[in-house]
Amino acid sequence: MKFKDIEELAKWNDEMVTKYHKDGTLFESKNFILALMEKNRLKQIIKLSDVKKEDTVLDLGCGEGHLLNLLPEVKEITGLDISKVALSRANTLLKDRTNIKLLFGSAEDTKFENNSFDKIFCSEVLEHVPDPKKVIEEIYRILKKDGILVVSIPDEKRIKTIMNILDKTRLKKLLYAARKDKDYEWHLHEADLNFLKTIVGDLFHVDKIKRVPFLLGYRFVIKLKK
């Protein structure tokens, strides 16, 4: 899928947020198991980042702000997203977090100065953007020399396998109340570790890889360093 400009991309993302997050994100799911697994993913991201009080932090593709809301108080926190619908929800969620700044913009061209951040999160974003390699290059530009990038991506093949098993055992409604196409219409790329390694190239080296949640392991949380 191609987009002629940022406005068209933003409009499409607003449509996807409105369509698939109508009743909230998985973090807000009424399904206790799903909500618990999602919270675990966000906590693993923060744990791997080793955030310090003196850090400047960016959540690139912050969505509705759930990761930002779990962050401890640090020097400076910024969230950037291309969906105004998601940012509006994030503003509501984070209204009492006065140290968090929310901005509208593209992950491919953030407009930040070089070497701006100590820690950058990019969670469930790369599979949704037109040019994920360009996003990685932009992160490299705005991350400080000794900075840490923590990425999370789905393991698409494992998700499809799990969904097929759930379909056959009739457990789909119990564990994953979603249509089969839920994770795919919004995805512009099929993500897995090879996908990440290809777009990262030599810009970053992988420090740690974790599968979450523990038993199903259908998402990767990856810590990278320059």
Image (cartoon, grey):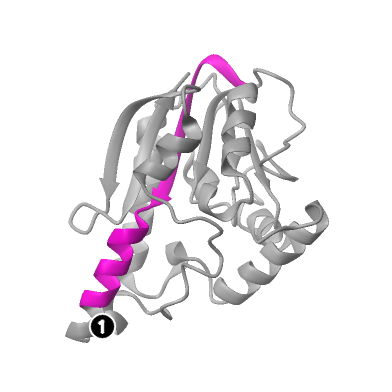
Q: Position of residue 217 (x, y in %)?
A: 25, 54
Residue drawn 52% across the image and 41% down it: 122
Question: Relative to residue 166, is residue 149 drawn left or right?
Answer: right
Report the side of 118 relative to 168 (left or right): right
Identify the residue at image location x=56%, y=33%.
136
Q: How many marks?
A: 1
Which residue is at 57% across, 55% downward?
Answer: 128
**What crowding class fits label 1: few (fewer than 14 Cα within 10 Å), some (14-19), or many (20 or more)?**
few
Residue 80 drawn at (x, y percent): 67, 43
Nearer to me, 24 or 140:
140
Residue 72 visible, this orientation: no
Residue at 49 percent across and 68 percent down: it is 184
Relative to the observer, which residue lies in front, 42 or 54? 42
Q: Magenta includes 163? A: yes
Residue 116 in view (yes/no): yes
Q: Position of residue 163 (x, y in %)?
A: 29, 73
Q: Which residue in the protein does label 1 denote?
A: 167
Any magenta on residue 108? Answer: no
Q: Residue furthest top?
A: 145
**Which part of the image, by quadrant, shows the N terminus?**
bottom right
Residue sitting at the far bottom: 170
- Secondary structure, mark 1, is helix
The image position of residue 114, as x and y in percent, is: 70, 19
Rendered position, 216 above or below 33:
above
Question: Residue 45: which quarter of the image?
Answer: top left
Q: Is residue 212 left or right of residue 52?
A: left
Q: Is residue 19 left or right of residue 191?
A: right
Q: What amino acid is at disc 1?
A: Asp
**Highlighted range, magenta:** 143-165
